[in-house]
Amino acid sequence: MQYLRRSVSLVLLAFVLGVVGVLLAAGGAWLVVLGGSWYYLLAGIALLAVGVLLYRRRQAALWLFAALFVATIAWSLWEAGLDWWPLATRCGVLFVLGLLLLLPSVV
């Protein structure tokens, strides 16, 4: 098997995505127990999967992140409408993480 060199930025971003995914899934699980939205649990699981796929240098990480971002925008519009601040708080962090995924040292 050929050794794939991983850059520091790739490993760091994969770690950050994994940690954010675990924290989001844990909080989302608690929210589900309380009768709230399933979005956070599912988004956390997806972010954790993106982190693992990114660490393994799989192109599927980018596709999964894109699907998560599109689903987040749809969910945000459904829940908050076109009000700027609720949309910014729901989509802003994923937007920034998505920009980091486009760094040359990551892809």
Image (cartoon, rainbow, N blue to C red):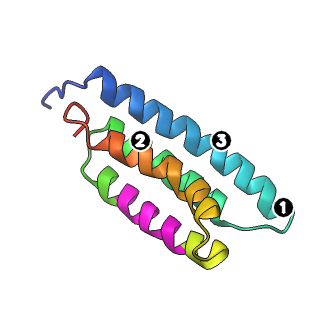
Q: From the top left corner, tell me how far across and down residue 91 is, in percent.
A: 52, 57
The answer for how far apart the CA atoms under marks 1 and 2 are is 26 Å
Say what amino acid the circle numbered 3 marks: Leu
User: Which callout, 3 or 2, points to the residue nearer the camera?
Assistant: 3
Crowding at label 2, few (<14), some or many (≥20) Cα neighbours within 10 Å? some
Q: Which residue is label 2 attached to?
A: 52
Q: Give the answer, above or below, for where 50 lies relative to 76.
A: above
Q: Which residue is label 1 attached to?
A: 33
The answer for how far apart the CA atoms under marks 1 and 3 are is 16 Å
Crowding at label 3, few (<14), some or many (≥20) Cα neighbours within 10 Å? some
Q: Which secondary structure, mark 3?
A: helix
| Total marks placed | 3
The outermost residue toward the right is 34
Q: Which residue is label 3 attached to?
A: 23
Say what amino acid the circle numbered 1 marks: Val
Judged by its main secondary structure, the magenta piece is helix
Q: Is residue 56 visible?
A: yes
In depth, the one of 97 and 23 nearer the eye is 97
Marks 1 and 3, the one that precedes in the sequence: 3
In depth, the one of 100 and 81 nearer the eye is 81
Say what amino acid the circle numbered 2 marks: Val
